[in-house]
Image: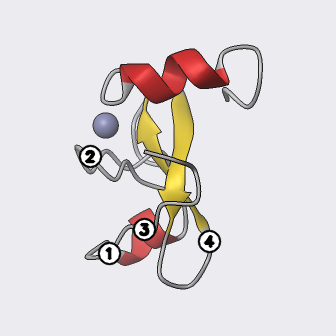
């Protein structure tokens, strides 16, 4: 999946890049910071994310890049 992949059916938090598009983890609410990587774009063009654990392939590609 490329980073330009459009992902639909997301919640508001997912569209804002604040929640995992795979498991739905809310990055602002979890106590432990969850490393996440960009996995595509929402229909509004915003970048959306998924946990490293949810998308190991994307995490590997982003290693040394935008992990945060
Ligand atoms: Zn996740």
Q: Is residue 34 visible?
A: no
How crowded is the residue under tag 2: few (<14 C-alpha within 10 Å), some, or many (20+)?
Answer: some
Query: Real-space Cα distance between discs 4 and 2?
Result: 16 Å
Asked whether, in this view, residue 10 is left or right of residue 59, the answer is: left
The residue beneath circle 1 is: 8
Q: CA distance from mark 4 to mark 1?
A: 12 Å
Q: Earlier in the sequence, mark 3 or mark 4?
A: 3
Quadrant containing the N terminus in the rendered view: top left
| Callout 2: CB less than 8 Å from ligand 1 | yes
- Is residue 29 visible from the viewing direction of this image? yes
Q: CA distance from mark 2 to mark 3?
A: 12 Å
Q: Is residue 15 above or below residue 30?
A: below
Give the Cα distance between marks 1 and 2: 12 Å
Measured as percent of width and height from the top left, residue 57 is found at: 42, 22
Q: Position of residue 12 (x, y in %)?
A: 40, 77
Q: Can you tell which quarter of the image residue 54 is in?
A: top left
Residue 46: mark in rendering: 4
- Residue depicted at x 45% and y 69%: 6
């Amino acid at each position: 999946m490329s980073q330009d992949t459009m992902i639909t059916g997301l919640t508001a938090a997912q569209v804002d890049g604040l929640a995992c598009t795979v498991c739905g983890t809310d990055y602002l609410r979890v106590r432990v910071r969850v490393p996440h990587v960009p996995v595509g774009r929402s229909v509004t063009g915003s970048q959306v994310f998924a946990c490293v654990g949810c998308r190991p392939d994307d995490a590997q590609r982003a290693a040394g890049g935008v992990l945060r």
